[in-house]
Amino acid sequence: MFNWIKGILTNDPKPTTPKCYICSLTATYYMQIRFQRINFELVTGKILITICNGCYDDTYEKYNPQRIPSPVKKGVFENKEE
């Protein structure tokens, strides 16, 4: 009986599961938001949020409805002779 009372009174920290930033369900993805100016100048600020499967699909459908992969930046595969 003593162990039962002790189990009720002590608070063991339980590992928290990450929650979706949008709908508060259990998150399965990290989403990184990077800001860039119109003239392609990178801004150093980035945001990292967690999202669930449903919100991932909704976000992907909203910003990339044709499921086109992101374009390769110019100069990535060019040979740079020094």
Image: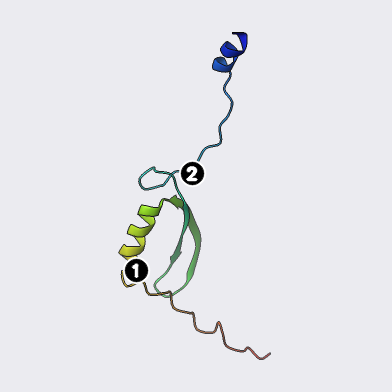
Residue 2 quadrant? top right
For the residue labelled by badge 2, is the local secondary structure a helix, a strand or a loop? loop
For the residue labelled by badge 1, is the local secondary structure a helix, a strand or a loop? loop
Residue located at (32% from left, 73% from top): 66
User: Does residue 31 sit above or below 2 in this rendering?
Assistant: below
Q: Which sits in the foreground, 25 or 49?
A: 25
Quadrant of the image containing the C terminus? bottom right
> Which disc, if any, is residue 55?
none
Residue occupied by mark 2: 18
Q: Which sits in the foreground, 81 or 40?
A: 81
Farthest residue toward the bottom? Answer: 81
Residue located at (58% from left, 17% from top): 7
Residue located at (59% from left, 26% from top): 12
Left or right: 7, with 51 as reference point = right
Residue occupied by mark 1: 64
Residue 25 x/y as whole percent:
39, 43
